[in-house]
Amino acid sequence: MATLIDGRALAKEVNAHTKQRIEKLKEKGVTPGIATILVGDDPASQIYTRSKEKKAHSLGMKSVREQLPASTTQAELVQAVEHLNSDPSIHAILVQEPLPNHLDDTAIVNLIDPLKDVDGFHPINVGKLYNNVQGNYPVACTPRGIMTMLRHYHVPLASQDVVIVGRSTLVSRPLQALLINEDATVTITGRRTKDLAKRTREADILVVAAGVPNLIKADAVKPGATVIDVGINRLDDGTIVGDVDFESVKEVAGMITPVPGGVGPMTIASLMEQTVDLAEWSAEING
Ligand SMILES: Nc1nc(=O)c2c([nH]1)NC[C@@H]1CN(c3ccc(C(=O)N[C@@H](CCC(=O)O)C(=O)O)cc3)C=[N+]21
């Protein structure tokens, strides 16, 4: 039976530390501020945005939501981002994905001040991560949360074979960069990979971010491997499952993250951490 990687418990620890950092910043007269732009009324996005706001407030930071109608034009969204870019009380800007189809997502991400880019999606920050540039810059929060979990549970990275299932820009690619930078050997696979199970069985660390419920069964996992499940799939009966068949895989894996209670809470904790990072870095820049 695998060791459970408890994302909920670790997120609590991370958040407690973030709260202390916020208190210190407030003593210096800086209250970290995060703004979320939410376009339209997708129910999942509403729930997720609300839980982030609640967390931000409970840690003592400022959190504002810019709720825009689904009919918002590109020009109106541009204006909302520019307004937040120039607001000194806001250190972190997050445009909730996905945007309605009529809006140009890339143009909006490019417009966010890279110093306020709490998602780490701006091409300047993506490029720095890709090139392993040293120094302070934000990285995508889900990969950051996964790295925190791996470190906390003392999972070795250097010389380890990592297989990531899925090739998304939001999760898989930045995670690949973070792991390469730690000297892991990282293979990105996807639904068109020839004999996927052959690849995943070679993984010391298997990360699944494919968006397919229960895609990975026990026979696709090397005994003793660390399995990180990024999937969040809501089934017709309302239950939430990951991309990994938890019940069978937990019998062969060495460590495994549950869904819910794994990567999800660590994503939010990382978002809070990174908001405080951005506030600290801007305080350094501004003296
Ligand atoms: N600009 C942007 N940045 C994001 O980081 C971003 C985004 N857009 N759009 C949507 C996805 C999704 N995402 C989640 C984060 C935490 C949970 C989470 O905490 N889930 C809990 C509860 C799951 C539930 O009960 O619904 C869990 O896994 O235990 C879920 C989903 C961030 N995203």
Image (cartoon, rainbow, N blue to C red):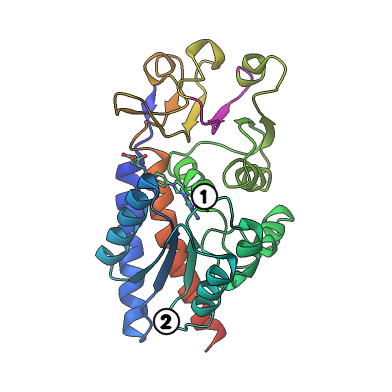
Q: Nearer the viewer, mark 1 or mark 2?
A: 1
Displayed quadrant of residue 105: bottom right
Report the residue marked by disc 1.
98
**Quick check: is 197 in the magenta stretch?**
no
Mark 1 CB lies closer than 8 A to ligand 1: yes
Residue, x 62% and y 48% (percent of image)?
174
Q: Residue extending furthest front?
A: 71
Residue, x 44% and y 66% (percent of image)?
275
Tag 2, which secondary structure? Answer: loop
- Location of residue 169 with respect to 206 vertically, above or below: below
Residue, x 72% and y 17% (percent of image)?
194
Tag 1, which secondary structure? Answer: loop
Give the x, y percent position of residue 16.
29, 59
Q: CA distance from mark 1 to mark 2?
A: 26 Å
**Identity of the amino acid at label 2?**
Ser
Q: Does residue 22 appear to the left or right of 169 in the view shown?
A: left
Question: What quarter of the picture does the N terminus occupy?
Answer: top left
**Quick check: is 211 in the magenta stretch?**
yes
**Identity of the amino acid at label 1?**
Pro
The one of 150 and 146 positioned closer to us in this rendering: 146
Q: Main secondary structure of the magenta part?
A: loop
Q: Which mark is residue 89?
A: 2
Give the x, y percent position of residue 121.
60, 57
Give the x, y percent position of residue 233.
41, 31
Other-residue count near label 2 (Cα within 10 Å), few / some / many at <14 / 14–19 / ≥20: some
Give the x, y percent position of residue 244.
46, 23
Q: Does residue 179 appear to the left or right of 264 in the view shown?
A: right
Q: Residue extending furthest bottom?
A: 287
Residues rendered magenta in the picture:
201-212
- Location of residue 118 with respect to 201 vertically, above or below: below
- Location of residue 151 with respect to 197 vertically, above or below: below
